[in-house]
């Protein structure tokens, strides 16, 4: 029985080696067309875009700004604030803040959530719709500030602007 496996193995081995030798390294020409971060134009031009979505990625810092601002002294300059966050921790905290805000304020945000870090204060800004009465908005604002400041161990300030409906955020149609 052992001899049977060795004869099968000796027959398969040259076939495998031959297929590895026939594989080639393929190259193609460089495509200079940038496609990521752009939206495809529809036939009827009925797809709504906000101002932030309408500007392509290469206009960041020219026509639009970043969604996360970190104006604290970073580790790069080696003069970091004592026990400050590393960039990876900041990114994870920003993801957590965005998930928490989208879950706490369901279907209310009409814009992106902007996170600004200044010294030890985190400011969260955004545009929401007026589908809730004002006392619920005040409650959710205080709720979000208290829980996030407890979890992140720093003061949190939620800055919101309200609009009537999400159609007011439409900048153009493509």
Image (cartoon, grey):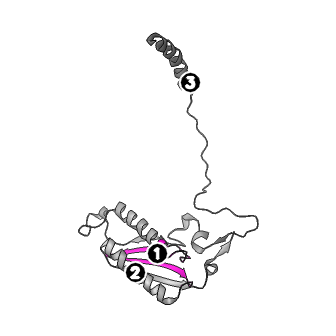
Q: Are marks 1 and 3 in contact (CB under 8 Å)?
A: no
Q: Which residue is mark 3?
A: 19
Nearest-to-viewer mark from 2 and 3: 2
Frontmost residue, 115 versus 11: 11
Q: Which mark is residue 104?
A: 1
Q: In this figure, which residue is indicated by the disc labeled 2? A: 143
Mark whose residue sits in front, 1 or 3: 1
Identify the residue at horizontal 43%, vertical 85% (top origin).
Answer: 139
**Residue 51 picture location, percent across and down:** 59, 74
Tell which of 135 and 159 is nearer to you. Answer: 135
Secondary element under disc 2, as helix, strand or loop, is helix
Q: Earlier in the sequence, mark 1 or mark 3?
A: 3
The alpha-carbon separation of the residues under discs 1 and 3 comes to 56 Å
- Is residue 121 in sight in this rendering? no
Q: Secondary structure at mark 3?
A: helix
**Above or below — where is 110 with respect to 80?**
below
Residue lying furthest top: 3
Residue 43, located in which quarter of the rendered image?
bottom right
As drawn, 41 above or below 50 = above
> Which residue is the extreme one toward the left?
82
Circle 3: is it few (<14), some (14-19), or many (20+) Cα within 10 Å? few
Residue at x 35% of width, y 79% of height: 146
Local SS, label 1: helix
Q: Residue at x 52, y 17 (%)?
A: 14
Q: Position of residue 81 (x, y in %)?
A: 26, 70
| Residue 161 position in % (x across, y down) | 51, 84
CB atoms at circles 1 and 2 under 8 Å apart? yes
């Amino acid at each position: 029985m052992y001899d049977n496996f060795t004869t099968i193995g000796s027959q398969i081995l040259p076939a495998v080696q031959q297929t590895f030798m026939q594989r080639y390294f393929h190259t193609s020409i460089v495509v200079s067309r940038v496609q990521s971060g752009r939206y495809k134009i529809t036939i009827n031009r009925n797809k709504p875009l906000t101002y932030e979505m309408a500007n392509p990625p290469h206009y960041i810092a020219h026509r639009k700004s970043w969604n996360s601002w970190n104006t604290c002294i970073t580790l790069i300059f080696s003069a970091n604030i004592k026990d400050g966050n590393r960039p990876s921790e900041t990114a994870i905290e920003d993801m957590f803040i965005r998930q928490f805000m989208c879950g706490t304020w369901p279907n209310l945000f009409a814009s992106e959530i902007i996170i600004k870090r200044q010294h030890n204060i985190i400011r969260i800004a955004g545009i929401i719709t007026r589908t809730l009465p004002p006392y619920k908005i005040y409650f959710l604002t205080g709720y979000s500030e208290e829980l996030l400041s407890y979890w992140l161990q720093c003061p949190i300030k939620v800055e919101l602007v309200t609009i009537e409906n999400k159609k007011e955020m439409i900048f153009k149609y493509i």
